[in-house]
Amino acid sequence: MEDIVTAAQPEKRKIALSGIQPSGIFTLGNYIGAVRNWNDLQDSCDCLFMIANMHTITVRQDPATLKANTYRAYANLLSAGLDPDRNILFVQSQVPAHAELGWVLDCYTMFGELSRMTQFKDKSAKNADNINAGLFTYPALMAADILLYKADVVPVGLDQKQHVEIARDIAARFNGIYGSVFTVPEPLISKSGAKIMSLAEPQYKMSKSDPNPNACISVSDKPEDIVRKFKRAVTDSEATVKRGEGRYGINNLIEIYSIAAGLTPEQVEQEFEGKGYGEFKVKVAEAVIEMLRPFRERSEDLLKNKDYLDQLQRQGAEKAARVAERTMNKVYKKVGLFR
Ligand code: ATP
Ligand code: LTN
C-alpha cells in the first residue's frame, strides 16, 4: 500500500516584473497605464518593480537631472502604494546582472527583429542626431530585465507589448538551444487606460519625454497647471462629449475622466449630454487633480529624505541581485562562459 500522503501543493504565486524609465517626471499616462495597476498586483503576485535608468541613457541625458528623476521615480513608486517589504523595488543600474545578461541576449537577438520595433523607429525619428546602438538593442536589455527574474507576467501599457513579445521570442530561442533556462513571459495589459494620448496631438501617446509641456500632465503638476492644460487640450469642432471613430481628443478625455471619476464611458457621455467642451474639460481637470493629489503630496514628502530613499534603493538592489545572480550563473554555465 502506498502510504505517502501527497499534501495539496499551494499554487505557486506568479512572478510579475515591470519597469519604468526615469526619462522625465511621470505623466498621467504612466500613472494610469502602469503604476496604478501595479498596486493591485502586489496582493496576487511576487512583484519586482524597477526604475529602468540604463534604458534612459539611450537618449542623451543631463547627469544631475537623470539622478534627480531617478529619486523622484523611486519616490513615485512608494507613493503609489507599492510596499518595499512586500515587493522588490529597485534601480536597474544597481544590479550589474542586467548589463551582463543584456550583452548575452544581444547575441541571441536578430538584427531583423530589432529593426521592426516601433519604439526604435519612433525614437530614431525623434533623435535623428543620436541613433545609437543602445537605442537599437534596447529590447534585448529589456528581455534581460524580465528573464533574470523568471517573470511570468509583465504589466505594461499597450506601447510596450511588442517589446514583451520579442522577450518571449528571445527566451524561446535560448531555451530551444540550451534547455529550459528562462520562463517565457506574458504581457499583462489593462483593459482601460492602456494608452493615454497626448493633449496637444491626441493621435500620439502621452509621453514623459515630450518636449511640449502642454502635451502631458505630469504627476507633480500643480492644480492650476492641470486646469490650464486640460482647457487647452485639442479636441474637434463637433462639440459633443461622445466617443467616435477618429475623435482622438474627446475619446481620450472621456477615457481619462471615466478612470479618474470611477465611471464607465457610457455614464460620462450621459452626464455631459447637451453640454459643451468647456464645462467638460474643467470637470476632467478637477477629477484628475483629486486622483493625483495624495500621490503628489506623498512624493514631495519622500523627496525631502534622500537618505531614506538611498537606503531603500540599496536594500531593493540587494534583494534583486540575489535572484538575478542565480540566473546569471546558470546562463554563463549553459553558454560556456567563465564567471
Ligand atoms: P518616454 O517618453 O521616455 O518614452 P514614457 O512616458 O513613454 O517614456 P515609459 O517609461 O517608457 O514611459 O513607460 C513606463 C510604463 O508606462 C510602461 O508600462 C508604458 O507602457 C506605460 N505608459 C507610458 N506612456 C503611457 C500612456 N500614454 N498611456 C498608458 N500607459 C503608458
Ligand atoms: N521599456 C519600458 C521600460 C522597461 C520595462 C522593462 C518594462 C524597461 N525594462 C522590463 C517592463 C519590463 C518602457 O519604456 N516603458
Image: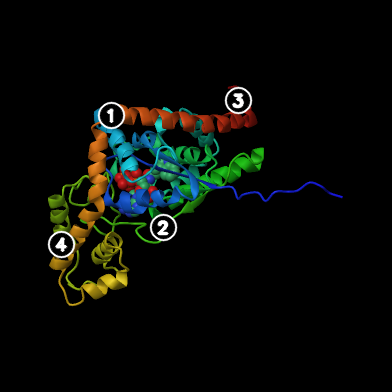
Q: Amino acid at mark 1?
A: Lys
Front-lying residue, 235 or 242: 242
Of callouts 1 and 3, which one flags the residue occurring earlier in the amino acid sequence? 1
Mark seen at residue 337: 3
Of callouts 2 and 3, which one flags the residue occurring earlier in the amino acid sequence? 2
Q: Is residue 248 above or below residue 134?
A: below
Front-lying residue, 336 or 151: 151
Q: Secondary structure at mark 4?
A: helix
Q: Is residue 312 left or right of residue 140?
A: left
Look at mark 2 in the image and give the residue it sits on: 190
The C terminus appears in which quarter of the rendering? top right
Look at mark 1 in the image and give the residue it sits on: 306
Q: Position of residue 273 (x, y in %)?
A: 21, 76
- Whether label 2 touches label 4, CB < 8 Å: no
Q: Amino acid at mark 4?
A: Val
- Whether label 1 touches label 4, CB < 8 Å: no
Mark seen at residue 282: 4
